Image (cartoon, rainbow, N blue to C red):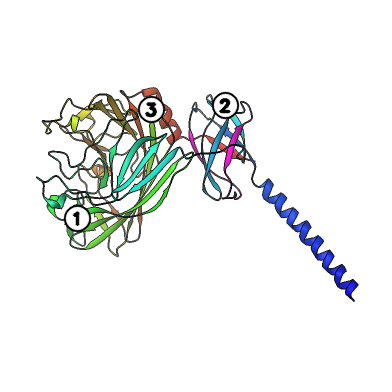
């Protein structure tokens, strides 16, 4: 009897070992993929790529991509168990293909994009250079301005790669504007006018609620934050999630803001036709003629359609660049409008005298955000030293509008 029990036990042990080995083999094979990237009609260089794989990867391992033609190796970052991000290691000519192998990393990986928290917000750096600061705490206006201009939930400062500050906060003449911020201006909710932009009207505002994710990495940093659009009469109307992805470049900065607004009420928010309101950029104090102490010169606006300065107001643009002399050096930022955005290419508001502009889909007419429905908007920011480089802008736009084609084997 004991002999039979022992035999059964040994057979079960053998079966478990075989099963274990099989699982290990399957698991091991699932960690390596061949990835074919086709450039399409555009040349590719330093292109950020986000890829969903057919299977899951181990979250406990770092990964890398190795080129079949050049043996170049680039780090890969997991942002979900089956989703990776990497920067294309090779330059790929138009209508060409490159092949890579995804495998467990053979070298140590360090966080190139870092995110540091302090009591006021989060400082994001790339290669140890500051890119921007996201303000979680309520920032009070200057002492000579009323307290109702207080604001949280915006990016300031935004830095150039050479260390200059490109943005302004509580600027003279427009105390309600805040560097990189978003707000709707002329809306109707429950039969009443609500302005989330102009705080002096005391109708509404936008506020930071909390940070849901702050993840550094070797390929990108991810900062996800929740804001709300609050009517002073009716309370919260919209919740807005910003997912900010920062890539690891040194000579220029590249990041994206994906915004999702959700109507959290049981009533429709009506966004009325108006000449501004949306995702905005407030430029440097050195470009502000109202700021007599700091003003140096006007900024330069250039759009994808070749239109310059205030002539671009209420035109439509795939991208907009704002640049000029700052404290000591020239720098600027190009903002790309994603093709999936509502009314793409969106109309823009460019102020005739002061350094502020915005993507403003309300220029082309009213629309609504119905109860529990969502409004989506995506933008890419290219921050550069000097005046805009059109070849670079066109390359970045090609990557954003027409990403390379990818096959996974």
Range of the magenta residues? 47-70
Q: Which residue is depicted at the point 15% across and 28% down?
A: 295
Label number found at residue 204: 1
Q: Position of residue 298 (x, y in %)?
A: 18, 26
Q: Is residue 254 above or below residue 52?
A: above
Q: Which residue is depicted at the point 23% across and 57% down?
A: 230
Q: Which of the 4 image quadrants contains residue 52?
A: top right
Which part of the image, by quadrant, shows the N terminus? bottom right
Name the mark nearer the viewer: 2 or 3.
3
Q: Position of residue 370 (x, y in %)?
A: 31, 58
- Mark earlier in primary sequence (1, 2): 2
In the rendered structure, are the residues bearing label 2 and label 3 in contact, judged by CB atoms less than 8 Å apart? no
Name the mark nearer the viewer: 1 or 2.
1
As helix, strand or loop, the secondary structure at mark 1 comes to: strand
Label number found at residue 393: 3
**58 or 257: nearer the viewer:** 58
- Mark earlier in primary sequence (2, 3): 2
According to the picture, the residue beneath numbered tag 2 turns out to be: 96
Q: How many marks?
A: 3
Q: Which of the 4 image quadrants contains residue 378?
A: top left
As helix, strand or loop, the secondary structure at mark 2 comes to: loop
60 magenta-colored: yes
207 magenta-colored: no
Gap between marks 2 and 3 measured at Cα: 21 Å
Q: Position of residue 88 (x, y in %)?
A: 52, 32
Q: Is residue 68 above or below residue 6?
A: above
As helix, strand or loop, the secondary structure at mark 3 comes to: helix
Q: Which residue is depicted at the point 48% across and 38% down?
A: 219
- Mark earlier in primary sequence (3, 1): 1
Relative horizontal placement of residue 122, taking residue 144 as reference (left or right): right
Gap between marks 1 and 2 measured at Cα: 52 Å
């Amino acid at each position: 009897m004991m002999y039979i029990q022992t035999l059964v036990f040994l057979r079960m042990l053998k079966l478990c070992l075989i099963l274990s080995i099989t699982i290990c083999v399957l698991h091991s094979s699932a960690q390596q993929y061949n990835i074919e990237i086709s450039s399409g009609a555009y040349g590719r260089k330093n292109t950020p790529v986000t890829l969903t794989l057919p299977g899951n990867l181990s979250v406990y391992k770092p990964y890398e991509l190795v080129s079949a033609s050049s043996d170049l190796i680039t780090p890969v970052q997991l942002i979900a168990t089956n989703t990776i991000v990497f920067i294309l290691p090779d330059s790929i000519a138009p209508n060409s293909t490159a092949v890579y192998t995804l495998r467990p990393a053979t070298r140590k990986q360090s966080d190139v994009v870092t995110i540091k928290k302090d009591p006021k917000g989060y400082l994001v750096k790339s290669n140890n250079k500051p890119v921007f600061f996201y303000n979680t705490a309520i920032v009070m206006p200057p002492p000579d301005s009323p307290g109702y201009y207080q604001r949280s939930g915006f990016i300031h400062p935004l830095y150039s790669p050479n260390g200059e500050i490109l943005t302004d906060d509580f600027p003279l003449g427009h105390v309600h504007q805040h560097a990189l911020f978003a707000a709707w201006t002329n809306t109707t909710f429950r039969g009443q006018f609500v302005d989330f932009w102009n705080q002096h009207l005391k109708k509404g505002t936008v506020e930071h609620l909390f940070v849901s994710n702050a993840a550094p990495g070797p390929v990108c940093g991810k900062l996800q934050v929740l804001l709300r659009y609050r009517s002073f009469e009716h309370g919260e109307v919209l919740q807005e999630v910003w997912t900010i992805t920062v890539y690891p470049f040194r000579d220029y900065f590249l990041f994206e803001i994906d915004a999702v607004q959700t109507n959290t009420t049981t009533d429709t928010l009506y966004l009325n036709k108006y000449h501004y309101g949306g995702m905005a950029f407030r430029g440097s104090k050195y470009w502000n003629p109202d700021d007599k102490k700091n003003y140096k010169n006007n900024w330069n606006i250039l759009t994808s359609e070749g239109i310059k300065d205030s002539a671009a107001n209420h035109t439509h643009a795939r991208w907009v660049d704002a640049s000029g002399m700052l404290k000591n050096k020239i720098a600027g930022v190009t903002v790309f409008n994603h093709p999936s955005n509502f009314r793409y290419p969106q109309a823009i508001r460019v102020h005739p005298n002061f350094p502020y502009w915005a993507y403003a889909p309300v220029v082309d007419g009213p629309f609504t955000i119905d109860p529990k429905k969502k409004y989506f908007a995506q933008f890419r920011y290219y921050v550069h030293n000097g005046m805009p480089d059109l070849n670079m802008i066109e390359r970045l736009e090609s990557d954003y509008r027409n990403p390379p084609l990818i096959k996974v084997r």
